[in-house]
Image (cartoon, rainbow, N blue to C red):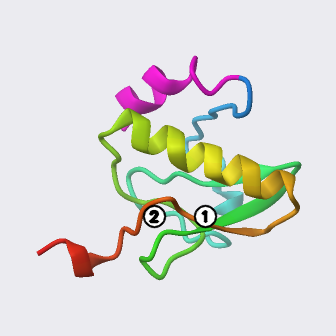
């Protein structure tokens, strides 16, 4: 996941900034956002948490590693467009529910 974030940082720099936060050093949001996974991606726009419907039931965050750079760029772009329109919940461009994984 770190490799994907580092490789897309230059591509998405016009509409997104990536911050890496160590949750052991900044424990304030751990209980609020249930941060306990090794890697979690959350989206904020103008100091407001933007939720994304990925079809997984958890709209607050992405807690698995995305391996495809373009897939991550598409998600970030969708979140940005929805957040600019004032939406607090955006629909992901791809359904990540388990019903398509068998």
In the depicted structure, whether residue 99 falls above or below residue 88: below
Q: Residues within 10 Å of mark 1 (few under 14, many from 20)?
A: few
In the depicted structure, whether residue 78 falls above or below residue 98: above
Query: Is residue 99 left or right of 70 when viewed as pictured?
Result: left
C-beta proximity under 8 Å, tags 1 and 2:
yes
Residue 53, numbered circle: none
Viewer-side residue, 32 vs 59? 59
- Asked which secondary structure carries label 1, the reply is loop
Residue 30, numbered circle: 1
Q: Residue tagged by mark 2?
A: 36
Image: magenta residue range? 1-13
Total numbered labels: 2
* The C terminus lies in quadrant: bottom left
Query: Is residue 99 left or right of 60 when viewed as pictured?
Result: left
Q: Quadrant of residue 95?
A: bottom left
Residue 4 belongs to the span the image colors magenta:
yes
Rounded to the nearest angstrom, the CA distance separating label 1 from label 2 is 7 Å
At x 18%, y 71%, the residue is: 101
Q: Earlier in the sequence, mark 1 or mark 2?
A: 1
* Residue 12 place in picture, x, y as percent: 62, 27
Residue 12 belongs to the span the image colors magenta:
yes
At x 47%, y 31%, the residue is: 5
Return the residue found at the far top. Answer: 10
* The N terminus lies in quadrant: top left
At x 42%, y 50%, the residue is: 39
């Amino acid at each position: 996941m770190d490799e994907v974030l580092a490789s897309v940082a230059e591509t998405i720099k016009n509409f997104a900034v990536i911050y890496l936060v160590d949750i052991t050093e900044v424990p304030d949001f751990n209980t609020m956002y249930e941060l306990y996974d090794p890697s979690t991606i959350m989206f904020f726009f103008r100091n407001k948490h933007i939720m994304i419907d990925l079809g997984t039931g958890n709209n607050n965050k992405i807690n698995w590693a995305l391996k495809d750079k373009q897939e991550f760029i598409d998600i970030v772009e969708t979140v940005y467009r929805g957040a600019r329109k004032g939406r607090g919940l955006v629909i992901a461009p791809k359904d990540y529910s388990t019903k398509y994984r068998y």
